[in-house]
Amino acid sequence: MLAQTDLNDLVYRSEIWLQSHRSLALLVVPIFLIVMPVGWSLGLGVVVSFGWMLLAPALGNRVFSRVLEWLGWDPMQVIFYVVVLSSFGAGGDYGRLAAGVGWFVLLRWRLLDLLVLPPAVRLSARLYPLPVPDQMLRAVIFSEAIRLGISLDGFPSIARWLDSDENDGG
C-alpha cells in the first residue's frame, strides 16, 4: 500500500482525526448556544468532545477527514466565532457571549482536554487493542487500503466481514 500512498499523508490524516474532537466541539457549541440554554449548550459540548474522542479511533474515512481538516482550520473557526458571538453581543445576550468566548478559550488553549482526556484514555484502552494514536493510524490505513482495493488478507476477520452478507456495501 505504501507504494501507492504517502506515509506522511496517512499520518497527517490520522493527526487530523486525533484533534477533531476540538474542532467538532468548537463548531457545535455556538450552534447549541443559538438554540438552547447556556448550561445545556456547554454540557452537550463536553459530551460531544468526550464522545468523539471515544468514537474517532474507530473511524478514519478519507472524505470526512477533509471535512474535519476544514473544520480545524483556524481562520474558519475564528470567522465563525466572530460572526456568532457578534450576533450575541449585538442582541445584548452577554451571557451567551461570555459562554461562547469562554468555550473558545477552553478549547483553543486545550484546557478542556485536562478534564476529558484522562477518562477518555482509560475508556479507549478498554475499547481498542492499541493506544489511541496507533488505533487512529490503523483506521486510516484500513480506510485507504479499502479505497485502493488492496486485499485485507492479513486481517482475516475484516476480509470475511467485507465479503459477507452482513456488509451492505456501504
Image (spheres, rainbow, N blue to C red):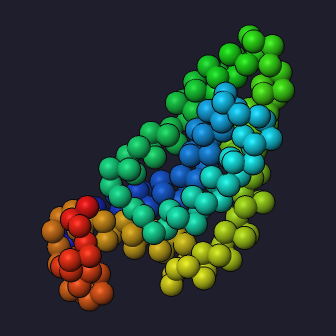
Q: Position of residue 8 (x, y in %)?
A: 36, 61
Q: Position of residue 110 (x, y in %)?
A: 71, 51
Does residue 47 appear left or right of residue 95 in this picture?
A: left
> Split into 4 quadrants, where in the image is the C terminus?
bottom left
> Split into 4 quadrants, where in the image is the N terminus?
bottom left
Q: Residue at x 23, y 85 (%)?
A: 160
The relative height of residue 147 versus residue 89 in the rendered view (above or below) is: below
The relative height of residue 7 versus residue 45 in the rendered view (above or below) is: below
- The answer to whether any part of residue 9 appears in the image is yes
The relative height of residue 64 versus residue 168 in the rendered view (above or below) is: above
Q: Residue at x 52, y 80 (%)?
A: 128
- The answer to whether any part of residue 152 appears in the image is no
Q: Residue at x 53, y 60 (%)?
A: 18
User: On the image, which quarter does residue 12 sit in?
Assistant: bottom left
Q: Position of residue 161 (x, y in %)?
A: 26, 80
Q: Position of residue 136 (x, y in %)?
A: 46, 68
